[in-house]
Image: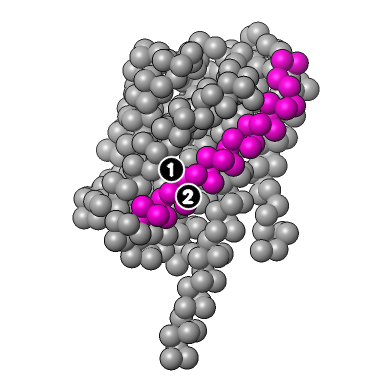
Amino acid sequence: MSPRRVRPDKFTLALLATVALASLLPCRDGTAQVFDAITDAAIALLFFLHGAKLPRAAIMQGLTHWRLHLTVFAGTFVLFPLLGLALRPLGQVLLTPELYLGVLFVCTLPSTVQSSIAFTSIAGGNVSAAVVSASMSNLIGIVLTPLLVGLLLASHGGGASWRGVLDIMLQLLLPFALGHAARRWIGGWVDRHKPLLGYTDQGTILLVVYTAFSAAVVGGLWRDTPVSALLATLAMCALLLALVMPTLSWAARRLGFSREDEITIVFCGSKKSMASGIPMAKILFAGQLGGLGALVLPLMIFHQLQLMVCAVVAQRYATRAAVTDDTLEAD
């Protein structure tokens, strides 16, 4: 794999620049309230467009390959949370309480869509199943992630509450449902402008990151968070991936899935969505904005790490398949 391939992408650089801006010029008082209102509107628009992008046929198709999708969902919503809980003793020693809760929050999130599909395609997996599984993961995650957050974080010292779960249902699920209902009228326009809508995703995330880190910096984030804890967060995110990806590969083989389906399970089941996660965090932890920066920091680290690791793994799958095909042709 070339050095160019593992460089941070433009969006990651934009995230880093946003964190730097919030650290140097955080918004305060009335300005922070204005940014907060703008961010709420952007989040509602984001999930409205996500609803409009999802074809109803994809939902129906999800029922036909149910074993694969259940395996992906088990990795996303069962294996990850269990590992997050199992790593609690290590997290309590190495991380600040907010960073550990951020790691646990990562474990509750749905899968990514675009990158899961892209890596599945590169590796030679079942792309159509990846499209359905990743899309369904995000749809189910709108409901299931807040419930997991309410169960896990609230019982382990987190600030999320069941009222926050209700808020996220209203502020995310309702716009999503309205967007899906409006697909018959705006679906064509949405499909023709997918690159533009991608900027909507990224712009919303940058807004949330700026407001979250502004509040965190004002509250003393960098003063109270040691460098050793940041490095430990990176190590714990790497450990999560190192545990999840081989486990999903092993499970797929034990369950008798084909090589193509195994690839889909590995990439869709091991990814976590920052596009969904940061807006959810903003709503679920609205009462403690001073700690929101530390809570979303593990997600930002995990996001970049999963892209780099999955890029390597996808290339290895593709190379292995090419060698196998050459061997068969030689025979």
Occupied quadrant, residue 94 = top right
Classify 297 as above or below 110: above
The residue mark sitting in front, 2 or 1, is 2
**Residue at 55% over, 65% down:** 316
Nearest to N terminus: mark 2 or mark 1: 1
Q: Is residue 263 left or right of residue 227?
A: left
Front in this rendered view, residue 93 or 136: 93
What are the residue bounds of the magenta stretch?
Answer: 223-252
Occupied quadrant, residue 155 = top left
**Residue at 48% over, 13% down:** 157
Classify 78 as above or below 8: above
Front in this rendered view, residue 15 or 327: 327
Q: Is residue 52 visible?
A: no
Q: Residue furthest bottom?
A: 331
Residue 144, horizontal then vertical, whole percent: 33, 30
- Give the residue type at disc 1: Ser
- In magenta segment, residue 265: no
Residue 167, horizontal then vertical, whole percent: 38, 18
Q: Is residue 73 left or right of residue 65?
A: right
Q: Residue furthest right?
A: 24
Circle on res. 245: 2
Residue 221, horizontal then vertical, whole percent: 69, 17
**Residue at 49% over, 27% down:** 104
Q: Is residue 94 visible?
A: yes
- In magenta segment, residue 239: yes
Circle on res. 111: 1
Secondary structure mainly formed by the magenta segment? helix
Visual colour scheme: one colour
SS for callout 1: loop
